[in-house]
Image (tube, rainbow, N blue to C red):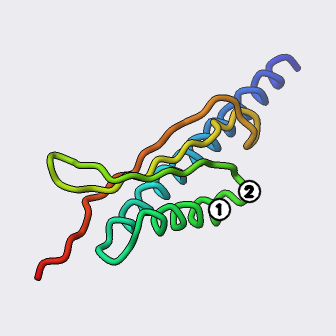
Amino acid sequence: MLVSVLVVVIALALLQLALTLHVRNIVMSSASEGARFAALADRSLADGERRTAHLIDAALSGYSVDIASHETTINGAPAVSIVVTAPVPVIGVWGIGEMTIEGRAYQETYRG
């Protein structure tokens, strides 16, 4: 009996770890994709924020995140940065603390 309780607790902890990593990977991927979208020559930072929010909502329906964007440089080249702040899921999708993830992409420019 005592061993089965321990096995169940370990199994639930592993499932929670898998969920936490899944959420982190979704947020990271969405931030990167939003930055790439905002870096296109005919797009704005607001377009990148909307794209990021759409991707997160599609994968993690109802998960509350804060999204910010700004222009930056990477090794002297113009770039776009999308920063997503989300709760760290500790029990199910409810969490304490925050994770901040940044996606960056080089800014596309017109040549002509």
Q: Nearer the viewer, residue 14 or 87?
A: 87
State the quadrant of the C terminus: bottom left
Question: What is the spatial separation of the Cα atoms under label 1 and label 2, in whole angstroms?
Answer: 6 Å
The image quarter containing residue 78 is bottom left
Q: What's under tag 1, amino acid-wise? A: Asp
Question: Residue 58's x, y, as percent?
Answer: 64, 66
Question: Residue 24's x, y, as percent?
Answer: 54, 44
* Vertical relation: 33 (above or below) 94: below
Q: Residue at x 69, y 30 (%)?
A: 96
Q: What's under tag 2, amino acid-wise? A: Gly
Q: Is residue 36 left or right of residue 27?
A: left
Whether residues under marks 1 and 2 lie with C-beta atoms below 8 angstroms apart, the answer is: yes
Question: Residue 6's x, y, as percent?
Answer: 77, 21
* Vertical relation: 16 (above or below) 31: above
The numbered mark, 1 or 2, whose residue comes first in the sequence reads 1
**Residue that mark 1 sits on:** 57
Question: Residue 36's x, y, as percent?
Answer: 36, 64
Q: Residue at x 69, y 49 (%)?
A: 64
Pick out the residue farthest to the bottom. 112
**Residue that mark 2 sits on:** 62
